Amino acid sequence: MSNNKTLLGEAWAFLKARKAWWMTPIILMLILVGFLVVAGQGSVLSPFIYALF
């Protein structure tokens, strides 16, 4: 196996090794919120994202 793992690969390996499946929804929500923050900064999607909140 390669020593050059990505952040996602490291997180997946941690979840598998530690059997910490309860962390999966937390990680998914963090990714979703991060996407909303990036998409909400001056893009075409901004009015739709602001309508959600």
Image (spheres, grey):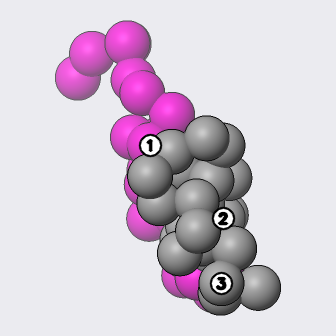
For the residues labelled 2 and 3, the Cα–Cα distance comes to: 15 Å
Q: Mark 3 = which residue?
A: 51
> With respect to residue 2, does 21 lie above or below?
below
Compare marks 2 and 1 and give the one earlier in the sequence.
1
Disc 3 marks which amino acid? Answer: Ala
Q: Which mark is residue 33?
A: 2
Query: In the shown orientation, is residue 9 left or right of residue 33?
Result: left
Residue 26 place in picture, x, y as percent: 67, 76
Q: Residues within 10 Å of mark 2 (few under 14, many from 20)?
A: few
Q: Main secondary structure of the magenta part?
A: helix
**Would you say residue 16 sits in the magenta stretch?**
yes
Which stretch appears magenta? 1-26
Taking depth in this image into account, of 36 and 2 the one nearest to the observer is 36
Residues at badges 2 and 3 in contact (C-beta under 8 Å)? no
Q: Nearer the viewer, mark 2 or mark 3?
A: 3
Disc 1 marks which amino acid? Answer: Leu
* Residue at x 66% of width, y 64% of height: 33
Residues at badges 3 and 1 in contact (C-beta under 8 Å)? no
Taking depth in this image into account, of 16 and 48 the one nearest to the observer is 48
Q: Residues within 10 Å of mark 1 (few under 14, many from 20)?
A: few
Q: Mark 1 = which residue?
A: 8
For the residues labelled 3 and 1, the Cα–Cα distance comes to: 30 Å
Tell me the quarter of the picture where residue 5 sits.
Answer: top left
* Residue at x 44% of width, y 52% of height: 44
Dot 3 lies on which element? Answer: helix
Disc 2 marks which amino acid? Answer: Val
